[in-house]
Amino acid sequence: MTENDRRIMADFEAKLHRLVYEYNQKEEDVQKLSRMLEEKENTLKELQMRCQALEKSYNDLKQARIISLSSEGIDATKERISRLVREIDRCIESLKK
């Protein structure tokens, strides 16, 4: 081998080592990014489940409020009707006199 061939071979080896090193670095970066992505996906799934639970809870509370308002409304309506009936009875009694 000539001196020129040795120099070319040394340059080639240096470039090959550099390429292998960069490949390993990129592979580590990909693994790190994959772990980060997996963590983010897990966090997203947890947040979606929490959001669904909160939505269900909110809907349950809305329904409970509607029911409670309805029963309050029913009681208030019954009381109002009773007052009106008593008032009508008084009026009838007054008319009879």
Image (spheres, rainbow, N blue to C red):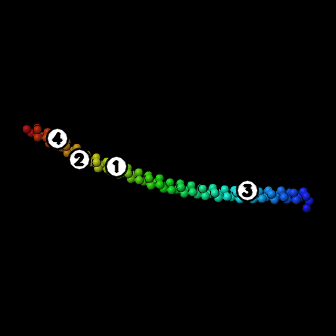
Marks 1 and 3: CB-CB under 8 Å? no
Q: Nearer the viewer, residue 29 or 70?
A: 29
Cα–Cα gap, marks 3 and 4: 94 Å
Q: Which residue is mark 2?
A: 78
Give the vertical position of 4 relative to 88 (above or below): below
Going by the numbered disc 1, the residue's amino acid type is Ile
Q: Quadrant of the C terminus?
A: top left
Cα–Cα gap, marks 1 and 3: 64 Å
Who comes first in sequence, dot 3 or dot 2?
A: 3
Is label 1 in a helix, a strand or a loop? Answer: helix
Who comes first in sequence, dot 3 or dot 4?
A: 3
Q: Nearer the viewer, residue 48 or 2?
A: 2
Q: Which residue is mark 1?
A: 66
Q: Nearer the viewer, residue 38 or 71?
A: 38
Cα–Cα gap, marks 4 and 2: 14 Å
Is label 2 in a helix, a strand or a loop? Answer: helix
Going by the numbered disc 4, the residue's amino acid type is Glu
Mark 3 or 4: the one toward you: 3
Q: Position of residue 51 (x, y in %)?
A: 47, 53
Residue drawn at x 91%, y 58% as measured from the top left? 3
Residue 22 is marked as: 3
Cα–Cα gap, marks 1 and 2: 18 Å
Residue closest to the far bottom: 1
Is label 4 in a helix, a strand or a loop? Answer: helix
Residue drawn at x 63%, y 55% as measured from the top left? 33
Cα–Cα gap, marks 1 and 4: 31 Å
Displayed quadrant of residue 23: bottom right
Residue 87 is marked as: 4
The crowd level at tag 4 (other Cα within 10 Å; few <14, some 14-19, many 20+) is few
| Left or right relative to 51: residue 29 | right
Displayed quadrant of residue 87: top left
Is label 3 in a helix, a strand or a loop? Answer: helix
